[in-house]
Amino acid sequence: MDSITIDDVGEFKFAGAVGRAELTGVWTWLARDIAPDLIDRERTDIAEALAAQLTTIPTLLARAEKAVAAASKDLDAERRLKVQLGSTEVWERLRAVLNALKCLPLIEKAKHFGRVINDIGSDEALVNALQSIPRGDANVAAVLLTAAVSEIANPSRLVVAATKIAGGASEPALLRMGLAPLIDACLAQAQNTIPPLLQVGGYIDMDLMCHAIERFHRLTRAITANIEVTRGSRWATIIAALTKIVSDKLEPRLRDVTQDLHQALRPPRDNVRQDADGMLSVLNGFYLLATVRDCRDSLALNKVFDECWSRTGQALEMYLERATDALRSAPTDKLVLARFDAGLKMAELRFGQDFVQVLKRSRDSIGRRQANSG
């Protein structure tokens, strides 16, 4: 269920996705109170337990539905069930989790469908593929589409196909044709890109963070660029809120890049070693800047980004000029060479390959002169 399980970091709930806390609460209830004879409680990993439980899922769900039906008719039974589940929040999401469990045998097929979508080149074939997803039961469609979208590299193509099926790009047109679960699936997966942005410390996984930003951009852009979202609607509200959350998480990191650059490239006091941690931090910052530049249409960071982009460019040019002068003075100094090469990596991200090639030719020319003089 990894493809439809989202971390508990966002405020929005979706019919086709379940939170980890919700899933844990319901599974604990099922194993302890509903089907202790069917579930091996020694398996602490829910994924493994579910994989071993596929054949008994219908029996499990039948018992659960009976308990829920009884609770809906009796206040005391409802209170007991809420206590067993651990919270009112889990109770409110119980039916969504049970629906996800009902779809469990189909989730892997839905993921395979998503991977197949990536290889479909024809727009007409893509429309036909999307129409093959059953839309009669909106809750089931929501789960299957959430699983499928987790595997789709370019969700924009699928959203465009949905507008063709709906006969228009307006939000009401998609709602009328029962295609709302697709948009919800994109939004659920977009919300699930937030956890990598919460990393702290000096050794964060910047590749994971940049991938999450790019994924958020593709998912939200698939909606905003292709659908006439009604102002104030649920979709518009979710997109605005998620954009704010992601942007707020990235803003302080962007503001730190210029300071990190100064700390990393200014000459070290002892002149015998380079601050490896500081260099890693500023390189991470430049990777982040480059990613935000490519995804800025889906973020509320234009002013902050423009400011950081300009300042880092000016500072980096200054340090690269100093590094080149230092290389001319001491072409065999390992520390000088290391600082120059680090500057090259940053310059590639900030200025592009053409600028870097000029610097490399300067470095090679200095090296040849040193070799000839030697």
Image (tube, rainbow, N blue to C red):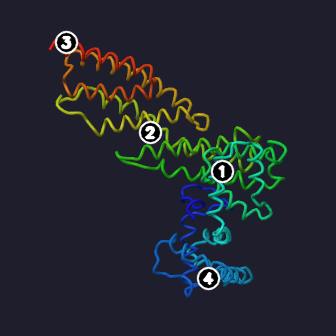
Using the numbered discs, state the Cα–Cα distance from disc 4 to disc 2 in whole angstroms: 46 Å
Mark number displayed over residue 253? 2
SS at badge 1: helix
Q: Quadrant of the N terminus?
A: bottom right
Which residue is rendered at x = 58% and y = 72% of the image? 87
Mark 1 or mark 4, which has the lower sequence index? 4
Q: Amino acid at mark 2?
A: Arg
Using the numbered discs, state the Cα–Cα distance from disc 2 to disc 3 in whole angstroms: 45 Å
CB atoms at circles 1 and 4 under 8 Å apart? no
Q: Is 116 or 304 nearer to us in this picture?
A: 116
* 86 w.r.t. 347: above or below: below
Q: Position of residue 216 (x, y in %)?
A: 58, 45
Q: Amino acid at mark 4?
A: Arg
Disc nearest the viewer among 1 and 2: 1
Left/right placement of residue 167 relative to residue 278 reads right
* 279 w.r.t. 60: above or below: above
Mark number displayed over residue 80? 4
Quarter location, residue 23: bottom right
Residue occupied by mark 3: 372
Which residue is rendered at x = 35% and y = 38% of the image? 281
CB atoms at circles 1 and 2 under 8 Å apart? no
